[in-house]
Image: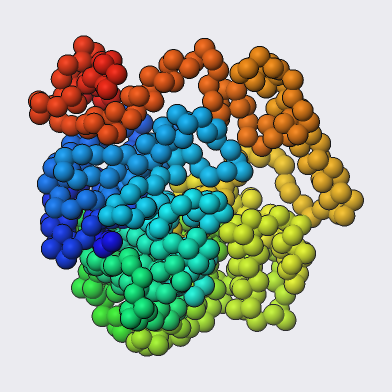
Amino acid sequence: MRIGIAQIDTRAGDFEATAGRMIGLSARAAREGADLLVFPMVSLAGPTPVRESEEDDFLVDAMEALVRMSEEVACPCIVPVVGSVDGEPTPEAVLMGEGRLVPLKMRAYADSVSRGMPADEDGPAPDLPTVEIADMRLGIAFTYDDLDDYDDFDIPVDAVVYIAGYGYAMDDPDSALGANLAEGRYVSDARTTGAWIVGVGSLGGYGTSVHTGSSFVISPTGDLRCSLPSFEKDLQVCELADDDDAAPLTPEVWNGPLYTWQALVLGLGDYLRKLDKRQAVLALDGSVGSMVVAALATDALGPTNVHAIVDVPGDVAREACCQRLARNLRIDVRDAQDMRAAQVVTDARDATLRRGIVGAYLAAWAEELDALVLSGADKTALALGERRFVPEADALKPVGDVYRSDLLELMRMRNTMSPVFPAVRLWEREVPMAGERDESVAEESWCQRIDQVLADHIEYGRSVTEVAAAAADGDLAQRVLRRLDQSEPWRIGRGLYLMVSSVTLFDARRPLGMAWENRVRTEAELDRSREVERLASRMDRTLGMAALQAHGTGDGDSSLSPAEGDASANTGNKGEKNGAPRQGDDRKMREALSFLRDFSYFGGFKSKGDGTSGSEGAEGGQGGFEDSDGRKWPSPFSEN
């Protein structure tokens, strides 16, 4: 089998233009002999659903694009579409070609339910799709959990197509796909499943998430057979066949700081372009964050499109450093003293007031240039609530998901490419604080300690007790995490930031107004906590048994053995939610499954008036169809 991967950067929801590009790429893939062409997760509809009030209209337009593509693509294609179920983003893989559309996950779920296979936490997902193309059986995965299912269960597939739905995250080596195979999971996945792994990565900035490409194909023996570049559009067709003469490719050498820099450049540039903005303004205020953002913006937009106000009151050396950086980057600079009403700014002795005035000038300058205001606030600053009283005009914080100690590493890496930063060290005023500082610890080491505490708690999900036990200074860890909690109200509404970690500060938010504060637990308290967990587990089992006994087991036997009661605690209410339906619902379920199968296989997505069963004959409204059992179904879409 020859499989093609189309690594493209698109604008989410630009259905007409994207459909045209996909059709053109399918023709190119067909000329290269592709039996199947796979597109990235977010290329058509984007990574997140639209608001609930617009879902129906969005779905209709997306379906029209899919129908057009199904009739015009030159080879079979898989096009993912992200929809919404109960408000959560839910991906679907649509197989198309020769005028047919098959939603693979929907079909897989319908088939599993029709076979009476209940959802089981200890089994594979019921909607895990498989499809046979060119004498190969392909599995489709969207998440790490899907990949785990193919690893853990005996699912007979020749290849697993992993259509990655995650954006890049600095702390997740798997998110870099083929760029970091040495640390990632995919070689192990191939060897465990004994199947080809085809990784399909999205490319570009979508909202504030960043996707870096790096698609790949790995053989069942773990050899790299195909590698698409990071941060670039590409289309490649790879043969999935055993070939002893085929020399495996050498994976690229992983450079974390360089990759993160390129990801931020890509995300920042794409964010502005997709908002139809071409220019950016910012304040070079002496902070590491502001200097990094100036360099990122220059790399993303070009020096003529970046404009900065240099304002470092009271520190001549640091101000000179910022001026020199601006000259090295060749960006347009205004000094705070050159602004109108400069005397007001100069005489504003209160730092908060002064920064607010500079922010107002930035907003006015951005309006004049039709530009976007950028902030240098980093994840450390946002976590600790630094400058919480400063009014801000920025629309985006490019490094708001990057810790300060990581910014220093990025600066050093960027200087190896071109020495634009005159100094790579923390400014005395920006050493992060959480109570008193230990003066015996160097400034950068102190910053690393604080960032490590934050990362352990936010990204790695460790409790206050665990973080304090692992930290060199348990008291510091408690102070930092207390400051994190206290700063939560301030973070709300502080603007957007590019997401380059697995857990952002927004993801780690806590309820506003929460009076409870966590603390380091003693060993006695930990023992009580374990006892509470055991009690909760027993309550779950008891409630599960009671629920099953109330509904019956479907054959009139309401008794349960202890082992069956334990299983019910893991799988939920088998009689109603996760398993086979009760007898009274059998007829409705059979009709629904018949609808799903016919909708998938026989033209439910056909456009109106094409003479098929998908376009007429239903009494329930225009666009309905008659299924294989003779029942007439209304259209699944609203009249709009």
Q: Residue at x 69, y 17 (%)?
A: 557
| Viewport quadrant of the N terminus | bottom left
Q: Which residue is drawn at 10% across and 29% down?
A: 610
| Of 247 and 232, the residue lying toward us | 247
Question: Above or below — where is 433 with respect to 414?
Answer: above
Q: Residue at x 76, y 69 (%)?
A: 473
Q: Can residue 361 be seen in this view?
A: no
Q: Is residue 422 visible?
A: yes
Question: Above or below — where is 424 with respect to 289?
Answer: below
| Viewport quadrant of the C terminus | top left
| Of 565 and 86, the residue lying toward us | 565
Which quadrant of the structure image shows residue 386? Answer: bottom right
Which quadrant of the structure image shows residue 9? Answer: bottom left
Tally the numbered discs: 0
Viewed as shown, does residue 559 lie left or right of 389?
A: right
Which quadrant of the structure image shows residue 302? Answer: bottom left
Question: Above or below — where is 416 with respect to 188?
Answer: below
Q: Which colour scheme is used?
A: rainbow
Horizontal and vertical percent position of residue 529: 81, 45
Horizontal and vertical percent position of residue 587: 44, 15
| Of 560 and 569, the residue lying toward us | 560
Horizontal and vertical percent position of residue 556: 66, 14
Viewed as shown, does residue 533 lie left or right of 296?
A: right
Horizontal and vertical percent position of residue 335: 32, 73
**Outermost right residue:** 524
Q: Residue at x 46, y 35 (%)?
A: 112
